[in-house]
Image: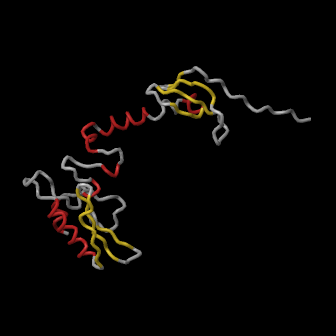
Amino acid sequence: MAAHKRAPRAIDLTGQHFGRLTVLRRAGINAANGNARWECQCECGNLAVVDGYGLRKGTTASCGCLRKELARARAGHDLLPYVDHEAKTLRNAEGIYYSSLVKSKRNRSGTVGVSFDQSQQVYVARLRFHGELVLNKSSHSKAEAIAYRREAERRYFPQKGDTGCMLPMDHDHKSSSKRRRS
């Protein structure tokens, strides 16, 4: 005769403190994995419904405010005035978007701001300056698309000394002498 197995009971966490969270009550619905969920009050004032296992094991310590504070501290306070709470809007002191200056690891053309549009079978040169798309030209020639981009860079990013901006070339951390040769 097989013994009856009882479903394990949730450990009552009401009133306990875990990091910045104080458990208020059991939430009505369990997590998808069957773990009990708990409504908690964070020290910052937010309410959060969290998995009890995460509370007990220490992987959940706040409503998310702690992660934001730690990320802000790691990023450095000098960048904060230029961030609009989205990574894609990260700008330098001149208000120029870093995505317009730095070659992405996804870049396949080898030139910042130049990509290949597979559906149209053309190269596209783009440049965003102070939130405005100031260049969006296409060409069947990669060299021509690069020339469009370089011309827009000269127009919108003066050489250092004029206004303090640096002309962004490929900015891929290679020495400038290597860039000039290619």
Q: In which quarter of the image is residue 155?
A: bottom left
Residue 110 screen position, x and y as percent:
29, 66
Q: Where is residue 24 in the image (x, y as percent from the top left)?
A: 58, 24
Q: Residue furthest left?
A: 161
In this rendering, is residue 23 above or below 109? above
Q: Is residue 160 left or right of residue 13?
A: left
Q: How many numbered marks have been drawn onto this rendered protein structure?
A: 0
Image point (76%, 33%), residue name: 7
Residue pushed farthest top?
15
- Whole-percent x, y for residue 120 in the image: 38, 77
- Quadrant where the N terminus sits is top right
**Residue at image point 29% right, 74% down:** 138
Instruction: Give left or right: position of 4 versus 78.
Output: right
Q: Looking at the image, which is closer to me, 133 or 32? A: 133
Q: Residue at x 40, y 74 (%)?
A: 118
Question: Relative to residue 82, is residue 64 depicted above or below?
Answer: above
